[in-house]
Each structure stands twice: as C-alpha cells, then as structure tokens.
Image (cartoon, helix red, strand yellow):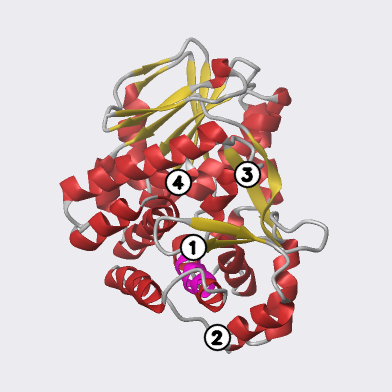
Amino acid sequence: MQVNIELIQGKDRNYKVYIDELGKLNFNTKVAIVTNPTVAKYHLDKVSRLINANELHIITIPDGEEYKNLDTLEFILNECFKYRLDRKSILLALGGGVIGDMTGFVASIFQRGIDFIQIPTTLLAQVDASVGGKTGVNSKYGKNLIGAFWQPKAVYCETEFLKTLPKREFNAGIAEIIKMAITFDKEFFEWLEEHNLNNGEDLKTAILKSIETKARVVSLDEREAGIRAVLNYGHTFGHVVENETEYKKYLHGEAVSIGIVMANELSLKLGLISKENVIRIKYLLQRYNLPIDYKIEDVENFYEHFFLDKKSNKNQITFILPKEIGGYEIKKNIDKNLILDVLKDFE
C-alpha cells in the first residue's frame, strides 16, 4: 500500500509513504543509518542487508526522549563529518519519533541540506511523526522548539517492526490515531470504537487511514499556517506535562492522551462538545491503557508554560479543541480564568 504526499509548493519534493513494501534500496552514494541500541538489536541487520550503497555507516545514539537535544544533534553531525558525508549523501532514520526528528533536523542543516529517508519502527512514528517533514530537538524551555521543516524523500512503514514494541509503546502510538479521528473523521472514530487495533488487519487499516489523513492535511498546509495546527490537538497541554516531568515519566503518546482529556474539558466548558462524547473519548483511550489523569502541582506555573508552546503568538495561547467528534475549532483569546478552572480540576 502507498500514500502520496503531494505538496502544493515545490512538487519536486513530493514523496510516497510505503506500507509493508520495504525491499532492496539502491544508492549510488554514501548512506548513514541513524538509530539507537534498542532498535538496532531488533532491526538493524535486516535493514542493513537491504541497502546497497557506495558506503554504509551506522550512527548510534542513546535511546530516550531526554537525549533529544542539541548535544546529541552535535554528535550526529560530527559523525557525518567523520565519515566524510557530502551533499549527495543520504541519512536514513531507523527508529521512533526521536530518531526521525533528529535525523531529519541534521539532514536539514548538514552542508545546508541533504536527503533523508524515514524507516519508522514505532506505531507513533508510523502514523504521525515520520510523515510531514517536522524535525527538531527539545530544549529546557519546551519540546521541539528548535527545528526545521524538512521533508523526507520516502517513508517505509513496516507493520512487522511493530511486533517488537513493548505494549506501552504500542499503546502510545494509538493515542495519535485516536487524536486524528476525533478532529477529522467521525466515521473513523466510530470504526475505532468497534475494532481492536491489537488485531493485525485492523491495525493495518488504522495505519493507512491515519497516514491518509495526515497526508491530506500536510498537502494543504505544509508549514502549519492553518489546518495543520489541528494535528496538535492534545499537544498544547501534553507538551507542558512532558516538560514538567522532564520527558521521563510519560511517553509522548501518553502525554498526548492526557492533553486530549484536558483539551476536552476546556471544550466542554466552552460548549463545543457534549459530556457524552467526552466520556466516549475517555473510554477509547482507557481501552488501550492510556493515562487520562494528571496531578498539577502548581496551576499558575502550568499555565505560564503554555506561552513556550510554538503555537502561542503575541502572548496569546492557541488551543486546538474538538467540536463534538469529527470537527474542531482553533481558539484564541480564551479567558484565563476559564483555563485556570480546567487546570484546577487536575490539581
């Protein structure tokens, strides 16, 4: 199965997402695979055997969101220089969202930009992070605040790779699938309620549907000037949760799950969503053991963290809120006291 990513600006940058079609990859240049020890243990040998290149190098970085920073970025760049990669060389991201984001960012700045390919090995990366060209690293001020838009040349999603995922990692990816269904596709959400993503065929259908949804959004709005911001539903709250817990307590998808619940409570107070649908969404998240509770230690401090989000502008916080199921609103200028009321429910 294939999904086309067709970009309005610069059609020469269009690319395909391949689902279960990874085969021999032939390159008349140097290739460097960026991965981590956990992924390498399961998948590096297989992927390496599929690559035919002038030279093949392996760049291994530590596993974990806490290593998604400028120090690791510099290490990858130095490895690229050590192996004498050039402007024709290709980077290959073999791993989850952290690997993909950092590899893409390195590709965007190494010698002012080289090609890279995504081979995502987590469900979250397959349905979301690997598609659309967002790259970057975290800083002490927040998540992905340093980065660039840099589209891959191709994305290869192999469902076989997901069999090695810990259950918690797998479920974290489902949060991103649910996120897209809530805001863009009521029928898909209802389908998710009736199906079990632990079933292989149902999972493949959900992956395809999620990638098609994201492809449509990215094609309309590559640089997040409008509709693409809706993909950040759950993230405005979730990024603060990640930052407060130093990226160690929750996986990204788990933080998004908490963020979805918080965003829904704000949407409920604004009259955009019914209590019934809030409960339906909670139930679907809970079915995959995703967290829906979070204890806020300092409500004012949590609120101030919103202003470090990339979507805030001119001291205004932008919230992506569901409009029932299958719709959305992008809201600004929400009264601070109303937001604080929502946060106080999580004290």
* Mark 3 touches mark 2? (CB < 8 Å): no
Q: Dot 1 corresponds to which residue?
A: 322
Q: Decide if residue 46 is on the left or right side of residue 85.
A: left
- Asked if residue 141 is positioned above or below residue 229 in the image, the reply reads below
- Badge 1 or badge 3: first in the primary sequence: 3
Q: Which mark is residue 346?
A: 2
Crowding near the residue tagged with mark 2, few <14, some 14–19, many ≥20 C-alpha atoms within 10 Å: few
Q: Give the amino acid at mark 1.
A: Pro
* Distance in Å between CA atoms under marks 2 and 1: 19 Å
- Badge 3 or badge 2: first in the primary sequence: 3
- Badge 2 or badge 1: first in the primary sequence: 1
* Mark 1 touches mark 4? (CB < 8 Å): no
- The residue segment tinted magenta is 256-264
Q: Is residue 244 visible?
A: yes
Q: Dot 3 corresponds to which residue?
A: 226
Q: Dot 4 corresponds to which residue?
A: 128
Q: Is residue 131 visible?
A: no
